[in-house]
Amino acid sequence: MRPALLGSVAVVLALVLTAPSAAATDRYPVSYGLAGLAKAAEAQLTRPGSAPPGANNWSCTPSAAHPDPVVLVHGASANMTANWQTISPLLANNGYCVFALTYGVPAGTPFPLNQIGGRNPMEQSAAELSSFVDRVLAATGAGKVDIVGHSEGSLMPNYYVKFLGGAAKVSDYVGLTPLWNGSNVANLANFYALARAVGLGPVIDSLVDIIFPAARQFLRGSDFLTKLAEGGVAHPGVRYTTIMTKYDEAVVPYSSGYLRTPNATDVVLQNLCSQDYAGHAMVAFDPNATQVILNALDPANAKPVRCQFVPVSP
C-alpha cells in the first residue's frame, strides 16, 4: 500500500541532507527526513535483507523503564531494512529492545523480489507476526510487546490482536499512516465495488492475487476490513496511537486512520506542526512523528513535540 522505498534511489541520494548529530550517549546515529530516506536506500542497496540499526539483538534484556520489547512492522512493498532506518536506532538509543521482521513474501520468491514484503494475504502475514512475537517474548522473557507499524504494518497486526490471540501479548500499538477504513486511492475502491456488483470480482481477484494478494484487502469495503471491524476495530485491552498526515497520497482519505475510541489517541501531524508536509513514506523518517511514537510508548515521560520542517516526499 505504501510506495516502495526501493525506487528513485538516485533522486533520494541526490537530496541528502545533513542528519542531526547524535548525542554523545547515543549508540546509533539517527537520520531524519531526506537524509533518512537516503540512508534507507543505501542500506537496501548495500545490505539487502539486513536488520535496521539497533534491531534484532536477541540477547537484549528489557529494562525496568521499558519492559516491553518493540516490534517494528513494515508497510506493503517494503521490508525491515528500508522502513526502519530512523525509528529503529532512535528506539534503541532510548533504551528499548527493538525487533523487526520482513513478512508477507511468497515462499520461493528469488532475490531481489524477495525484498518486496507485505504481499501475502494479511491473514497469513498476521500468523507470521504471531510466530515472531512469540520468539521475541521467549528470547527476552517479557510478558508483552509494543507494536509500531507503518501502512500495512499499522493495519495487519490488528488481525493478530483480534483473532490470533495477540491482545494478551500487546500493550501499546502505534500505527503510522493507518487505514482502518481502507483507502480509495485513485478511486480503486469504487472501481472494485462496481466490478463486484457486475460479477467481475472473481476475475479481478484472481489477477491481483498472482502478484500482490494483500493489495485488494486495503481497499475501502474489502472483506478483510469488514471482518476487522466486527465488534469495533480497536480491541479494548490494547492502547492505540494513530499518526496521520493530511498529505498522505496512498491512504485516501487520510482520515481513514481515525479510531475515535476511548483507548485510542488520534494524531494528525499537521495539527501539531503546520510545516510538516510528510507524505505516506516520509512519516517513517519524520522527527515530529518519532516524538509522538516515543510519547505513546512512554507517556509518563512524554515530551513536547518540537516542530521541525519536513519536506514533501520526493
Image (cartoon, rainbow, N blue to C red):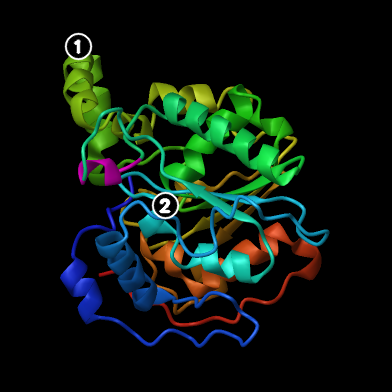
Residue at point 67% right, 61% down? 96
| Residue 168 image position (x, y, % from top left) | 73, 31
Seen as rendered, the residue at the extreme top is 199
Q: Looking at this view, is 69 or 252 the one in front?
A: 69
* Contact between labelled residues 1 and 2, with CB atoms less than 8 Å apart: no
Q: Secondary structure at mark 1?
A: loop
Q: Is residue 305 magenta?
A: no
The quarter of the displayed image where residue 137 is located: top right
| Circle 1 residues within 10 Å: few <14, some 14–19, many ≥20 | few
In this rendering, is residue 17 above or below 154?
below
Q: Is residue 113 magenta?
A: yes
Q: Amino acid at mark 1?
A: Gly
Which of the numbered marks, if any, corresponds to residue 172? none
Range covered by the magenta-colored residues: 112-117
Residue 162 seen: yes
Q: Looking at this view, is 102 or 7 the one in front?
A: 102
Residue occupied by mark 1:
199
Seen as rendered, the residue at the extreme front is 59
Q: Amino acid at mark 2?
A: Met
| Residue 251 image position (x, y, % from top left) | 37, 49
| Circle 2 residues within 10 Å: few <14, some 14–19, many ≥20 | many
Which of the numbered marks, if any, corresponds to residue 80? 2
In this rendering, is residue 257 above or below 26?
above
Q: Secondary structure at mark 2?
A: helix
Query: In the shown orientation, is residue 150 left or right of residue 9?
Result: right
| Residue 237 image position (x, y, % from top left) | 75, 36
Q: Looking at this view, is 139 or 297 the one in front?
A: 139
Residue at point 23% right, 76% down? 13
Residue at point 65% right, 65% down? 294
Q: CA distance from mark 2 to mark 1?
A: 38 Å
In this rendering, is residue 193 above or below 30?
above
Residue 232 seen: no
